[in-house]
Amino acid sequence: MSGGISRRTPLKVRGDIMALDRWIALILLLMSATYAYTAFFTMDGNLAPFMRNTPIWPSTFPKVLSVLAMIAALTIVLGFEKSDAPRDDDPSVIVYRRLLDYQVVPALVLLGLMVAYALLLRPIGFLTATVGFLVIGSLVLGERRLHILILVAVIAAGGIWYLVQEVLGIFLRPWPFFMGV
Amino acid sequence: MIGLATAFSLTNILMVIGGCLIGTFIGMLPGLGPMSIIAIMIPVAISIGDPSAALILLAGVYYGAIFGGSTSSILINAPGVASTVATSFDGYPLARQGKAGKALTVAAISSFVGGTIGAILLMIFAPALSSVALLFGSPEYFALMIVGLSAIAAFAGTGQVAKALLMTLVGLMLATIGEGVLFNMPRFTFGVMDLQSGLGFITLAMAMFALPEAMYLILDPNRSKTEGGTNEIKDLRITRAEARSIAPVIGRQSIQGFLIGVLPGAGATIASFLGYAVERNIASKEDQEQFGKGSLKGLAAPESANNAACTGSFVPLLTLGIPGSGTTAILLGALIALNVSPGPRLMIDEPQIFWAVIISMYLGNVVLLILNLPLIPYIAKILAVPRTFLIPFILFFTLMGAYIGQNNATELLILVGLGVCATILRFADYPLAPLLIGFILGPMLENNFSRSMNLFDGPIFMVERPLTLGLLVIAALLIVLPSYRARRARLRAQGVADGD
């Protein structure tokens, strides 16, 4: 895996990006259609009788939104609006077709780490989860100065815990549940 | 004079300094906006006893928190407050170009001028403006929100209007999830209990901005290298030419932001988005192309507008007793707890409190500038931290922001899911800011739409009220004009335009 990618991306690759944006518009069109179905056909089923005489129902605003969203999505899917291709030397662009040339593995591992943090935050406590997250996250990205890493993680986790729990009064369980705190 | 004497007492000056410092540092944490910080500080303020001192402390916290929020927007693209979302559009690109020091300085100066002009306008026009604000009914608010949402066309690039509109509509649809205040029933929750209260703003903001940026930094290590050296990052200097170019922007947006802030319900968020959109639309073609890529004008506009709007939001609070925003609603609670009743008689019955608050706003802005300018080189050094440390910390603060906001671990899973979706949307060049703007304005838009529909027994209000109609026409023009301009430009380029 390279440590980055050349900024020179052939223009024809941009064509793929356009294809992706139409695929996304198609997905959003389907989602809007589902939203519209719910708003038009299922949402008002349990509406109280007195509400049926008012000009506004819970589904009124969603109905308007769903129709507008379907029109906007269709405009993109059918290619009615032509957009200029971004400059090929634009450093903000990541070419998804060449995703494997980028650092995909660390990105996926860190996403997994975030999920693990979410699931373990309460059972193992804020301090343990945070120190673990920061240390493993840095190791995944190539940091090897373990002594600095652990020190920084412990200070940061302790400092934030003190600020949030003790100063601001927002409860954060510091230690694992079996330690009784 | 009574206000001057009260505000310049040693205790009150210490209150302003303390408030600004607390607000700035806590405000930097994504997830803790001015509203939460002020709510946390209320018991401290009440324990002080003296209403003037307490309010001065809270005003300092308010301004400090807004500046702190701008700092995290600029440095790590993590806007923890809705009113600083627009700051990240150009603030973060500037930081990535190695101009973090300059960006923070422009933000500090713009905030200072915006707040100061706002305070002066408040002193002069408060009583008169409060009666104007009352002319705005639900239909006008609805139309004003539509103008705000249509202004997203200004964020979209050439030929991107449909994408920006689609993203806005997706944001509006996401805002309808959960149990709204208007109808006492859950909508689009699909039986999931965690969706009953809807999605959290902070979760969505982190998922749309901070998380995709962190993913990009991981995917492409070259991105984390800012273009300037450490000295340049810390460099605060603004050239004379740059100062000349941003001065009119700051002046215009301070006034516009203040006027929007006066309207109850509009507030700093709409002021910052509209400020950005207006400046982008009236800029020259070369300047327009710089917006979103690190334009100083694009940074100065929302910063001056949101600070001026914060000051403006005190007009209905102090003169009518109507809180114009969530933050001023909490301040109203604090005032009542301190046995002060805001309203038309406040200026007559307790002039020392009224004027002390106004003077403290000015003082707060001065103190904020004096305190923050020397700190900027140190704050900006965050960008010099190696990516192996910086990225896990950005991810951690993103998670913490979402967790503190809702105190719910499921919110973190939603954050990761939405963040992955946002990264894919970014791959395909979809603008993400309109989605967040739609989500923020969605509940206000629906409330005003529903109230207007009930009041006028249908959608006739859109044409019956001249001000509403005028605003809706502006909104339509904002959507149509960019597409029309792009089409004309393309036809010209192909040589088939009129006259060719």
Image (tube, coloured by chain):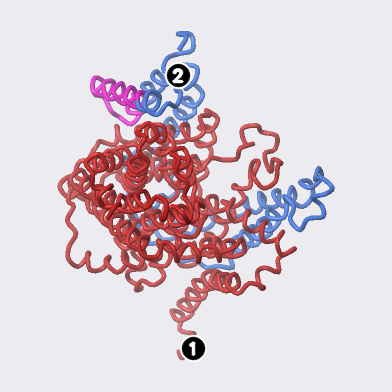
Chain colours: A blue, B red
**Does residue A89 appear in the picture of this structure?**
no
The correct choice, above or below, for B332 with respect to A129 in the image is below
Question: Residue A173 got which mark?
Answer: 2
Question: Residue B498 got which mark?
Answer: 1
Q: Are marks 1 and 2 on the same chain?
A: no
- Tell me where residue A170 sits by quadrant: top left
Q: Check disc 1 and report its element: helix, strand or loop.
A: loop
Residue at coordinates 74% horizontally, 56% vertically from top-left?
Answer: A56
Main SS, magenta region, reads: helix
- Tell me where residue B230 sits by quadrant: top left
The correct choice, above or below, for B204 with respect to A118 in the image is below
Where in the figure is residue B224, as x and y percent of width and height?
Answer: 30, 43
Q: Chain of mark 2?
A: A
The correct choice, above or below, for B374 with respect to B89 in the image is above
Residue at coordinates 28% horizontally, 51% vertically from top-left?
Answer: B365
Three-letter amino acid code at the position of disc 2: Arg
Q: Nearer the viewer, residue B396 or B217?
A: B396
Q: Which image quarter is the N terminus of chain A in? A: top left
The extreme left residue here reads B231
As for residue B399 lying within the magenta part, the answer is no
Other residues around mark 2 within 10 Å, as few (<14) / some (14–19) / many (≥20) = some
Label count reads 2
Q: Nearer the viewer, residue A49 or B236?
A: A49
As for residue A159 lying within the magenta part, the answer is yes
Q: Check disc 2 and report its element: helix, strand or loop.
A: loop
Q: Write down the region rendered in magenta.
A: A135-162
